Amino acid sequence: MQTIEKWRRYELTLTGPSTGNPFTDVELTAEFTHDGKKITVDGFYDGKGVYKVRYMPQETGEFSVATHSNVAELDGKTNEFTVVEASGDNHGPVVVSGKTHFAYADGTPYVPFGTTAYAWTVQPKEIQEQTLETLQTTCFNKIRMLVFPKSYDYNTKEPAIYPFAGKPKVQRGGTDWIFDASDTGFDFTRPVPEYFQNLENNIDRLDSLGVQADLILFNPYDRWGFARMGLENNLAYLKYIIARLASYKNVWWALANEYDLMDLVGQIPLKDWDRIGQYVHEKDPSQHLESIHNFYDPPQHKDTTKNWYDHTKPWISHLSIQSDNVFMIPKWIQEYQKPVINDECRYEGNIEFGWGDNTAKGMMDSFWRIILRGGGCTHGETYIDKPDTERPIWWAHGGKLYGESHKKIAFLDKLLKDNGFSWVKPQATSGPHWELAAGSTPDEKTWLVYFGENQPEFEILDFLPMGKKYSAKLINAWDETITDFDQEISGEQKFHLPRNDFQALLLTEE
């Protein structure tokens, strides 16, 4: 009998018909039974007459599986397997913990330190390998990435393989969007297994690096018609990719990159998103994290999110937002009672767009301000001249990182881990200290207060609990230095700060 660890992938492989259209003609499900409980999982066609059923068990013990199909050779197949406790680095999937933050399923802390490489899995093999090698050297534990190719400035090359059978009927320029999906040259009812095999192999390799795949299911930047397949084809595609990938413990479902832009340009209408979101939730037996990402940002410093999707929907596990407003994170956490990740807050780089011309210091500063306000943050890098314009750009293609912010972000990540921040409890979220970013460990024994570019001669942290005193270390976030601070800190008295930018204080209750 096969033995697998909890949260690892069980896979049953069967042989069946390859004629006709196996993706639409053949129905295959499997019923998993454990301890009197049953769950039904969709199977999928993997090409060349091969069918598979995958499942991620979340309990230990004995499991049995039985298939059901409209095809005789796939129907009534049975198997048994044993699930044992997880070991080593297997902490299970990331889940919502305590309503407003995350942890792994076994309780291990998880704070999102993300990065962005949208179309890295459709690049040449050497770039895919280079991307994984780069991630191995960083602190990033999440990557935003697309299922489909991307058509945009600096994303002009055709992929070597497409997600659906066929090829583009009309050759378009690198940034031209398709506006008629009636005759694209692709058959949206026939996924290309090799395309999705490459995607899932890379997701597996991300898992070995401890990186979550924040997988974007739809995106508006499209010249092939994949954003205009229509609701019926969209749901069929979702059924297929969920059957393939729901058993991967490091997968997150990001319904869209900039869902509202897709409505604006006539791709997926707003009315379809609730159906799509519910469908993903219903079809996923593993109940992975699920989000939807905006294009339009609410008016700055206003108490409104009217341009966002309704994040109160029960199938939305957390907020994935695009905003350079780093001050509102605690309010959004409080308002929605869900975790908040600022997945696009301007990237380090020198691209001609305002969202991608931030400095390394600016990118680092956003991480400190967002993380210490209780959110998660995502990095991106968009340099177009290092070393030349022909090289891959990290935000689009992966490859190598040339900037400095990722090193400084790693310093913050290590600082939190070394000082017991299993998650960051936001503090000083309003009032006269709005310009500071301050967070504590859950037990409020250790605090981290970030001043950013502010350079007060004197400061008083009157949001600290009255009557308590703290020893302190002075931190320079850019220089990556930690030194003893020779003054005792309390919430009742002012103290002197040396004049410098990007300073922080690490406070420990005495």
Image (cartoon, rainbow, N blue to C red):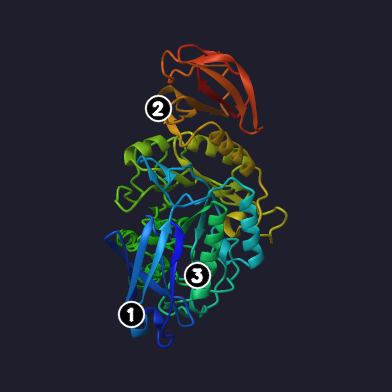
Q: Is residue 265 visible?
A: no
Separation (CA) of disc 2 from disc 1: 61 Å
Quadrant housing residue 272:
bottom left
Give amino acid for label 2.
Ser
SS of the residue at dot 1? loop
Packing grade of label 2 (10 A; few <14, some 14-19, many >=20) is some
User: Hey, which residue is sitting farthest left in the picture?
Assistant: 36
Find residue 296 and name its label: none
Front label number (2 vs 3): 3
Q: Is residue 508 visible?
A: yes
Count of all numbered marks drawn on residues in the image:
3
SS of the residue at dot 2? loop
User: Hey, which residue is sitting farthest bottom in the picture?
Assistant: 19
Separation (CA) of disc 2 from disc 3: 47 Å
Q: Earlier in the sequence, mark 3 or mark 1?
A: 1
The residue where tag 2 is placed is 430
Front label number (3 vs 1): 1
Separation (CA) of disc 3 from disc 1: 25 Å
User: In the figure, 173 relative to 487: above or below?
Assistant: below
Give amino acid for label 1.
Asp
Q: Nearer the viewer, residue 87 or 498?
A: 87
> Residue 17's x, y, as percent?
41, 85
Front label number (2 vs 1): 1
User: Hey, which residue is sitting farthest right in the picture?
Assistant: 387
> Residue 72's x, y, as percent?
33, 84
Find residue 196 and name its label: 3
The residue where tag 1 is placed is 75
Packing grade of label 1 (10 A; few <14, some 14-19, many >=20) is some
